[in-house]
Image (tube, helix red, strand yellow):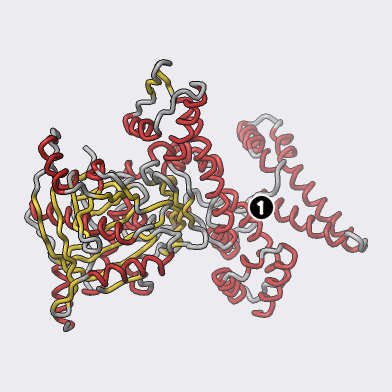
Amino acid sequence: MSEANSQSDLKECTTIGGELGTSSCKFCCDDTVLIFSSVVGDALSDKMEESWRLMNRSKDVRWVRNLAIFDENRNSWRYVGAMTRNSDKVNWFTDQGLIRDYDDAFLATKAGLLLLALEMEKKGRPIKKVGLGFGITVRHGESIIEKFFAYIKEKLVERDGKKFLKIVAKNVALAETREIEIELMFCVMQYQAYGAYMTLLFSKYNMNIYNTYVIDIGHGTWIKLPIIDNEAEINLSDSVTAGIHTITKNISRIIFESSEQKFKIPEQRIMEKLPFKDYKIEVPGVGIYDFSKFLTHECQMMARSIVQQVSNDISILSQKGHSIDYYLIIGGGSHLLFDTIKSEVGNYFGWQGDMLEQKVINPQTIGIDPRYMNCIGFMLLARDHVAVELEAEVDPSFNIKEIIQDTA
Amino acid sequence: MEGAVSEAVSEATNTEGLYYLVVDQELKDLLGSFVKCHPEASKAVLKLILKMYMKLVQKSKRKGKDPLVAFQNLIETFITGRLYETTRDKIDYLDFLLEERNDKLNGIGESTIIAEIREIKSIIREIRNLPSSSATTGSIGSAATAAAAASSVRNLDNFYPTDAAQLVELQADSTTTKKRKNFKELRREKSNKIIKF
């Protein structure tokens, strides 16, 4: 490929940010964020699928909720995200922040690109060439994720020196099949929580470098990543196996013990109630159980444990002559732990009032949802890479208008 | 003079065990600049600066502030000659000297050092007595002297420090004072991991 061609290709390149999280995969393109569960499952047989379609009463026939991707390796369809509700056998392909199954993670990547391509097509901005910004887990290290992308490379179709990803997908509810091809140009990678830092860099920081300590509280893990002089301090970053799941699991256990081991409330039922701040649950034969007290206690315990590790890191950084300008708390669990962590950080440093408000950043106060901040940042990372290659100014603006989820 | 810096650095590191702090390039440069600007600066002065820096580092560590920014402020104070701008500064400095002399005294018992300590103690006493004597003169009755007395009483805190000597106050928000690097300059130097398909 000639240099001139390469430059013009980059100009047409659509930048997409993505990450494969323990509970959900997130992708971001322009003003659209896509989220679906990190799960892939076996498809029904053709006959069973037909029967299911006849019996399906759901009005939600969106692609994201009824998606099957064709798996060339198995020569069969596989359900992705919410559609796995109909699968006999499901596979959560990331566990404790690690990609456990390359085949299924590849299908999820395909699903993300396909769903965004369909969405952008509807908006009159079809995706032809893609530059990816991708979040890698701290525990992976670069070599493991390189293996994953080497695996993807093998699956690409080469034509005229260009690499294309062929995606065959089906909307099971509509029995509609689509086949698309996307040219993959590059993938720029950084540690998962770095995406959130990029988002701040392009917005609040106005492209100036501020040392930032990112705490990303997810479903099964929480990640700590100090960023000093624009670089991840990898020696101090870690992915700890504790998250919202730890909290809900403990609450479920307490309810089980309180009911004299008669009733086991699934953690999922407790988790579903948290975003609505509904802390009451019905225990059959016992009554309504208010778990708000235990939730507060569990959140405090976890927040303290997080801040303890953070404060250890601060001491180490301080001994190296570094200081942290801002603390950023993101992820699906941040709404539960933000206030406690902020207060604990304030206690540690002796910060109060405005000082504390400024130092500990709640993404919502700057208009960004803490759950999607990373993948927005990875889109910006890819956009920045294109700008550097083209020796052009990078456009720092972003405005998320639509969030598409596989759950209703 | 460069040799003096190194010596001071190594000695300070031996006593405080904060090697990584004092060999920091930025700090070395700062000390180097100081020595160039003030060739009369002796090894003792540099030792004093280093000790103060280490105290600053400890304080900064507790408060999560940037010790280098605080140190730069301190150097600024030295250069602009405002070291003894307030009486409190003077007391702090004398306290520091006293502490240093006490350390030396252990096991030595030199009469000259004892004499020095006496001298320092008498200066401290003199300074501490200053507000009360002002207050006494203010009791004559004029409005001006009454105001002076009131002012002296307000300043009493400065003359009777109860806690450890305080060094230069850290900036309330170090993020606003530090000259920030720009991402656009850095991104060309440090590239991310890229896979080209």
Q: Is residue B61 visible?
A: yes
Q: Residue A124: which quarter of the image?
A: bottom left
Which residue appears farthest toward the bottom when viewing the image? A2
The three-letter code of the residue at mark 1 reads Asp
Q: Residue B20: which quarter of the image?
A: bottom right
User: In the depicted view, which residue is nearer to us: A283 or A233?
Assistant: A283
Q: Residue A380: which quarter of the image?
A: bottom left
Asked if A285 appears above or below A296 in the picture, the reply is above
Label 1, residues with CA under 10 Å away: few <14, some 14-19, many ≥20: some
Question: Which residue bears the numbered disc 1?
Answer: B89
Q: Residue at left 71%, top 67%?
A: B12
User: In the depicted view, which residue is nearer to us: B79 or B195?
Assistant: B195
Asked if A306 appears above or below B36 in the picture, the reply is above
User: In the depicted view, which residue is nearer to us: A43 or A361?
Assistant: A43
Element at badge 1? helix
In the rendered image, which quarter contains the C terminus of chain A? top left
Picture coordinates of residue A321 (x, y %)? 56, 62
Q: Residue at left 53%, top 53%?
A: B65
Q: Residue at left 56%, top 70%?
A: B30
Picture coordinates of residue A236 (x, y %)? 52, 58
Picture coordinates of residue A162 (x, y %)? 17, 76
Picture coordinates of residue A164 (x, y %)? 17, 70
